[in-house]
Amino acid sequence: MNLDWPLMKDTITFKDRLKMAKFVMTSSKLTNGPRVKQFEKEWDAWIGANPMGMNHSLFVSSGSTANYLLLSAVKEFCNLQDGDKVLVPACTWMTNVAPVIQLGLQPIFCDINLENFSFDLEDLDYIKEAHPDIKVVFVSHLLGFPGDNEIIEELFPDAYILDDVCESHGCLNLDGEKVGSNSLGATFSFYFGHHMTTIEGGMVTTNNASLYELMRMKRSHGLAREASPDRFEIYKNQYKDVDSKFMFVTDGYNFRNHEVCAVLGSSQLKRLDKMIAQRRRNYEYFLARMECLNNIFHMPSDDTLTNSSFCFPMVTKHREDAIKIKTILNCCGVESRPIVSGNLLRHPFLKGYSLTTCKQDGRFNVDIAHNNGVYMGNSHFVNTRMIGKLFDVIEENV
């Protein structure tokens, strides 16, 4: 049986392509301009208002640059010092952790849990005592699951909480709000195969107008002209010996995106809720079939209302079953991959770092996910018939 089930599939429709082609043929400006600003405002509206007012969003070149831009701006805005500690999970994407190191901060690695793949709550309690000086908690909302922000905020009331929502567009917190809608800083990825795509691209959101202004300048080389009109006037009057149009007031990068990707983003955003709804329906059926095999699998979160289901995670209790599952997936034409990238601390780049954990037996959840875990793609192209056929084969052979 060949289910022809890829890990990711292009969400760009023929109509999307026509919109981009028409724009390219008729527009006199293709670099960062009015369509980028329009897409940012549309994203503001989609992510939702927060108690402090409107969100502020910045369209950037990728989810990875979104992470770097956010952390760079937070370090400057919050006056963090080299060596200050940033709490990160041991299972996430590398560009969550790399900016911490690149910016001179110190990553503190926490084990994960096997339900929503966020921080292990028992180890969080231990880390609170072992590292009372944690300055930033960078929460990875992995695989469509919302992390445990409410608990994290209670444990680390003095830390700055940042949200990586790159894989979890539309997941909800306990108040029913989209994760990232009321955050000091949140990042999203629009890479091919994510909930929506701009081919390459990402978004940073913040509820803080001053942080937004700083990120705007950093996104474009650190130029003063990217500040608010009032702030720009202050800079012009303060530094009259510098051409104000080419004045640099902070370190910066070229993390901008362009008009064509913004046109695609606006088109995709109109369908995003519908695509997330299909992912949730698929995940609900996946859970129902997986429940019959709960003696084999560690069951992921059964909350089908708050997650936006990036994929179907499968973590077995025993290594031999994981090998069988991978063989079945290959034979059925189902592409799979590790849980994100497995245990990051096994990768050469992070040699020398280790978990901060209270576990004495050496059995870490992140290693279980690394050794026994795979995930399959979920999208609006997947349906319950495909899921059912796959589980029929699994039930017969495991």
Image (cartoon, rainbow, N blue to C red):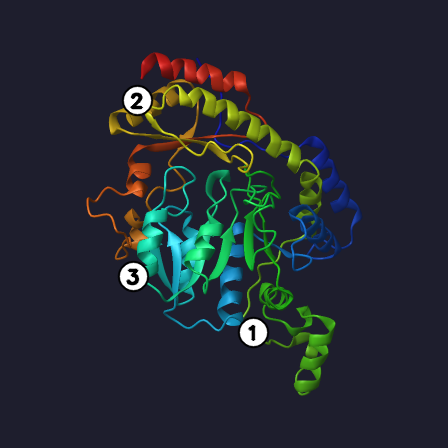
Q: Classify the position of the C terminus by image quarter.
A: top left
Q: Which mark is residue 324?
A: 2
Residue at image position (51%, 53%) is 163
Mark 2 lies on a secondary structure that is helix
Q: Return the x and y of residue 51 as percentages of the image width and height.
A: 65, 56
User: Which of 166/148 is in front?
Assistant: 148
- Give the residue pinned by disc 3: 130
Q: Against 293, is 361 above or below?
A: below
The span from disc 2 to disc 1 (Cα, nearest Å) is 54 Å
- Give the residue pinned by disc 1: 250
Nearer the camera: disc 2 or disc 1: 2
Between discs 3 and 2, the one toward the N terminus: 3
Kindly identify the amino acid type of the residue bearing the numbered disc 2. Answer: Lys
Residue at image position (38%, 32%) is 374
Q: Is residue 347 left or right of residue 1?
A: left
Kindly identify the amino acid type of the residue bearing the numbered disc 1. Answer: Thr
The span from disc 3 to disc 2 (Cα, nearest Å) is 40 Å
Q: Against 247, is 273 above or below?
A: above
- Local packing at callout 3 (Cα closer than 10 Å; few below 14, some 14-19, many 20+) is few
